[in-house]
Image (cartoon, grey):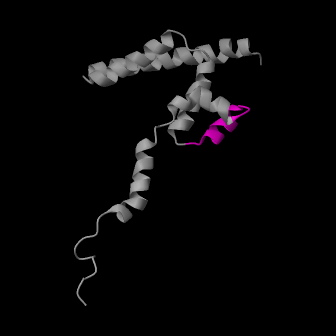
Amino acid sequence: MRRTTFVRLVWAPTVRAAEAALRKQEAEAHASQRKEDAERAAAAADRLAGGVDFHELRHYYASLLIFAGESVKVVQARLGHKSAVETLDTYGHLWPDTEDATRAAVDTVLGKALEPETAQERPSATV
């Protein structure tokens, strides 16, 4: 199937159906006085109404993999990138910053060695 045919017969109707479903969720949330839910549904529906390019699905898929904790190599393979550098150049900003986790790992291993000895642990000077 040609890309243009796919977009016309499958993609565009699916996007319209998703927008309609979100508008319905928005109305139900308003009726139930769930303001935050209504605003979230409205924002998503507005985004779809503005037009969603088929290529955005690829970016969404990549972001889901990254959010799920997949490695650079897994995302690279799933997207068909030639190298991990290409994947990192495109999606590197989506991986969480691990500075705190790295610091915690070092503290866990080395922290006890760096703590001062307590009076109970010190050997007695008298024999």
Where residue 56 appears, x then y in whole percent?
A: 58, 20
Residue at the spot 40% in from the left edge and 16% down from the top edge = 43
Question: Which residue is farthest top?
Answer: 50
* Closer to the camera in the image, 60 or 84: 84
x and y, in percent, of residue 55 in the image: 63, 19
Q: Nearer the viewer, residue 55 or 90?
A: 90
Along the line of sight, the residue nearer the viewer: 107 or 85: 107
Q: Answer with the quarter of the image where residue 6 lies.
A: top right
Give the residue at the far right of this rendering: 1
- Magenta stretch: give its range: 70-83
Which of the two residues, 7 or 124, is positioned nearer the viewer here? Answer: 124
Left or right, residue 103 beside residue 78: left
**Residue at screen point 63% across, 37% down:** 75
Q: Which quarter shows the C terminus?
A: bottom left
14 w.r.t. 67: above or below: above
Residue 65 at x, y = what percent?
Answer: 56, 37
Q: Please say if 62 is above or below 21.
A: below
Residue 61 appears in the figure: no
121 lies left or right of 40? left
Is residue 36 visible from the viewing direction of this image?
yes
Q: Quadrant of the N terminus?
A: top right
Which residue lies at the image location 52% right of the left edge and 17% below the top edge? 17
Q: Quadrant of residue 35?
A: top left
Q: Write the residue at 60% across / 26% down.
A: 90
Task: Name the spot of residue 85 as percent of width and height, x first.
Answer: 66, 32
Magenta-span inclusion, residue 80: yes
Please identify the residue farthest to the bottom as the structure is shown. 127
Q: Is residue 11 left or right of residue 110?
A: right
